[in-house]
Amino acid sequence: MSSASGVEAKRRKTFYTLKVRYMLNFRTFAFFFLIAFSYMAYTQELKKDSVYFSHGLEVFNRVKEVCDIDNGKLLGFYYYCPLMLVDRESRVVLSNTSLAFSDNAPLKGIYYGTLPEKYLIANTAISIDSTLYSCVSIADTIRLDDRMIEVCLHEMCHYWVNKNNIHLSYNNEHIDNVLARTYFILEMRALQNALLSTGKEEEQEQAILDALTFRKQRNLLFPKQIEDENKFEFDEGFPDFVAYTLFYSNKDSLKKKLFDVIEEQIDKKSFYRTFGYVTGAVYAHFIRDFESYRTTVFQNLNIVSTMMQSRNIKTIPDTVSIRCKDIYNFEQVKHYQDSLEQHHLYVLDSIKYRLKHGAKIMIKSEQYTNIGIGLDGMFAIDTLGTYFSLLQVIGDFGWLKTEHGAMHNDDGILIFIDNSISKRKKTIEKAFDISFNKG
């Protein structure tokens, strides 16, 4: 009996020993497998980061090279400045200078970190803990094309404008009025002629004067908007002028770029959010002896008046001549814009009908002070019947006109959408956007 018990005990001991060894071997295998898998994932991520950082470094180097070539000739100071590339999804930041919100040591000469949630990701200049940066938002990968460099150079101009404590707000919805659109397109056609008149000074002067004549007709229709047009042109058009002028050192390439930008603008159905980029850049290009007038631009924030001063243009015709109407096909352009206006009115009625049968929503927010509401997939409208790709209201910078109005308190906002009309002013302030009623 005792002998059998001893055999059984020995068998159990052997079994448990084998079991323990098996478990140890399995756990060891699992442990090393996990290490191997983690290493593979790590190396894969490192490889990804390596490409990511390499692309970021190439962008910074190309931008710096452009600034080095200029070496302060255009604006009177060395243009290179703090620049952040920010991924919109992960909020990962690559920068050419140290970051106020990250203590990470630079990798491959690039500073990196994660942008805190409280900061808006946008193409602009932003201040973080009293440190100013130019910011370019990116999606997934860092592009290495010429447009990426242009955008970086554009946003760096916002950095320098902010450094000069220049902050502008404006509203130019009038530009999409049917007559304003007509005169704007004719103004653009005249500026294209001015760009094409290479080596023919008199033809260029006449084409510029033609453009100013069409512009004056629009200004006579909307005299209260003249200042807002000038602000938009300085705020966005001047940075484009700087970016294009620095990047396209060849004069013919620069003129082609400006010509193509005008052509792209003319093809748009709405000019409300974009016209100033073009007119500001092109008129700045025509400032004669720019180096002598660059201070004037920053003083009066008026590119067109500075251009006229540099070219000694003192008067602009009060009416459009028959010659101008014939050269730029005035009647044809006006007829086409009239037909578009009929479509605009149809869209306006359609939107009013859809919104009249739309939704009532309640939004509560303790964290955000500015709340944006958007109807994706619909046209936006203003009092002129203009439409855009997105109907949106942004907190304190926009307003709703509704039959029932809107109620709000400290805890939230109750908005009744019923036959509403939306407006939005330009802002770079942080906002919380909510979309509903998609499609």
Image: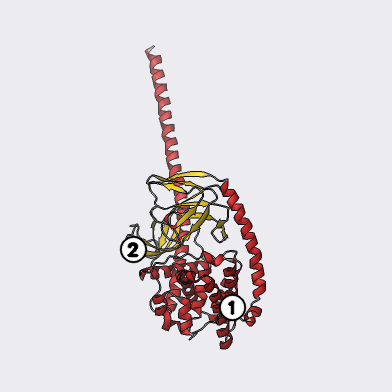
Query: In the picture provided, is 185 more to the left or to the right than 400?
Result: right
Residue type at the position of mark 2: Thr
Q: Which mark is residue 348?
A: none
Judge whether 272 appears above or below 377 on screen: below
Give residue 384's quadrant in the image. Answer: bottom right
Residue in view at x 43 percent, y 65 percent: 169
Q: Secondary structure at mark 2?
A: strand
Quadrant of the image containing the N terminus: top left
Asked whether the viewer can see residue 173, the reply is yes
Q: Secondary structure at mark 1?
A: helix
The mark nearer the N terminus, 2 or 1, is: 2
Callout 2: 10 Å neighbours few (<14), some, many (20+)? Answer: few
The residue positioned 41% from the left and 53% from the top of the image is 370
The three-letter code of the residue at mark 1 reads: Ala
Left or right of 322? Residue 78 is left
Residue 148 percent across, percent down from the top left: 50, 66
Instruction: Give me the C-alpha separation between circle 2 and circle 1.
Output: 43 Å
> CB atoms at circles 2 and 1 under 8 Å apart?
no
Which residue is more in the foreground, 288 or 354?
A: 354
Q: Which mark is residue 190?
A: 1
Name the residue at 44% across, 58% down. 397
Nearest to the observer: residue 162 or residue 312: 312
Around disc 1, counting alpha carbons within 10 Å, would you say few (fewer than 14), some (14 to 19), or many (20 or more)?
many
Q: In the image, residue 159 lies at what x, y percent? A: 40, 68
Q: Position of residue 65 (x, y in %)?
A: 44, 74
Query: Is residue 145 at least partly visible in the picture?
Result: no
In the figure, 439 relative to 217: above or below?
above
On the image, the x and y values in percent for residue 382 come to 54, 59
Q: Which labelled disc corresponds to residue 131?
A: 2
> Which dot, 2 or 1, sits closer to the camera?
1
Quarter assignment of residue 72: bottom left
